Amino acid sequence: MTSIEIFFGLLFGLTAYLIFRSLALGFYTVAPNERAVITSFGRAQRLKGSTLDTPLADDLSETDRERYIFPQIQVIPPGGPYFRWPWQKVHKVNIAIATASIAYDPETPDANQGGMVLEAVTQDQLNIGVTGQIRFSICEANLYAFLFGVKNPIAHVMGYFVSVLRERIATFRAPEDNTSGEQHLEGISINDLRKNLNLLNEQMDQHCRSSAARYGIVLDASLITGIDPPPQIDGALAAINTAHNEVSSEISVAQALADQRIEESRRAVEIQTMNAEAEVEPLNWLAEQLRQLKQSGPDAIPGYLRNVRLDLYKRARRIIVEAKS
């Protein structure tokens, strides 16, 4: 066997191997909870338009719209088998909803007490520990940002969430409620945070809507379950709250008694007013009768007075007549 035959044999075998490998390994499938993106020599298959043409841009400010412009790419839906060429690469992502602690740090798992408690500072400079969970999922409409926008999108979106959460805690102010009559305890914002966890969670959901346009990750919901002060001041804070509750209770009792007295006084005034009106009503009726008598003729009033005197004479037991000298 000559060298030329050996060379062509090796070339034929290499070609057959590459063809077999391409056919055997070129097929792939996409699971129901997955989406796939194909890249050819590192470039994804793009569509017309960008994220600015999608509803995701509505959650971005005017300045952020210029920073987070990502192209629309071809997304392969669940199913298969699909075929790819050797120079193409398949990127699969799981779009199922995932759950993580709000203190989870993907780059440093041991931070924040093993990813369980997040430290934050309140408006009155109190260091607190925040616990809770966050649900997130990969945005199918912005897979380019998740796959190619940043190196570690989970770390970026967790950092963004933590920064927003700390900013909201540092500037949180409870809404004024004048209807309940409850006295507000000034200087202790941790009480406001504990009483308004639902409001804080709603604010976090609203501020984190832009994460889908920024990083391709949808923050589905945040659930802050606990806000705890440092152990060394927990007892003092409990004593302050107890004293405040006692004062609020005394104020409420005094306010209730004052309201009761005011209501009793109002009722007494109404009763006296009705009694006075009842006494005045016969006088008004008599005045109206005399006015009508006066209009009937000049002799009506003297006749009426004569009849009144006769009636009085009948009722009297003794009559005294004063003689004129």
Image (spheres, grey):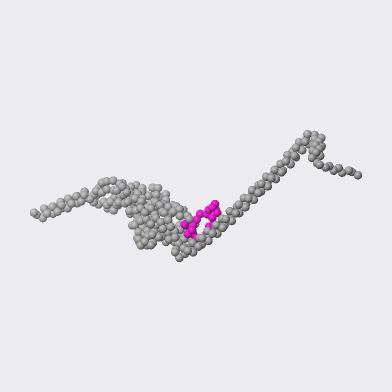
Give the quadrant of residue 112.
Answer: bottom left
Q: Quadrant of the C terminus?
A: top right
Residue toward you, 202 or 232: 232
Labels in figure, total: 0
Q: Specify start and end residues of the magenta stretch as a single range.
A: 174-194
Residue 186 counted in the magenta span: yes
Residue toward you, 276 or 207: 276
- Which residue is situated farthest in the front direction here? 317
| Place of residue 189 in the rendered image (x, y in percent of width and height, measured from the top left) | 49, 59
Our reading of the magenta stretch's main secondary structure is: loop
In the displayed structure, does residue 145 sit left or right of residue 247?
Answer: left
| Place of residue 43 in the rendered image (x, y in percent of width and height, measured from the top left) | 30, 52
In the displayed structure, does residue 251 sit left or right of residue 68?
Answer: right
- Which residue is at 77% across, 36% downward? 293
| Place of residue 118 in the rendered image (x, y in percent of width and height, measured from the top left) | 41, 60
Residue 20 counted in the magenta span: no
Q: Quadrant of the N terminus?
A: bottom left
| Place of residue 254 in the rendered image (x, y in percent of width and height, measured from the top left) | 59, 56
- Which residue is situated farthest in the bottom direction here? 232
- Which residue is at 54% across, 52% downward? 179
- Which residue is situated farthest in the top direction here? 296
- Which residue is at 36% across, 49% downward? 141
In the displayed structure, does residue 30 sit left or right of residue 133?
Answer: left
Residue toward you, 6 or 204: 204
Q: Report if residue 30 is visible in the image.
A: yes
Residue toward you, 97 or 230: 230
In the displayed structure, does residue 65 sit left or right of residue 277?
Answer: left
- Which residue is at 44% across, 60% downward? 228
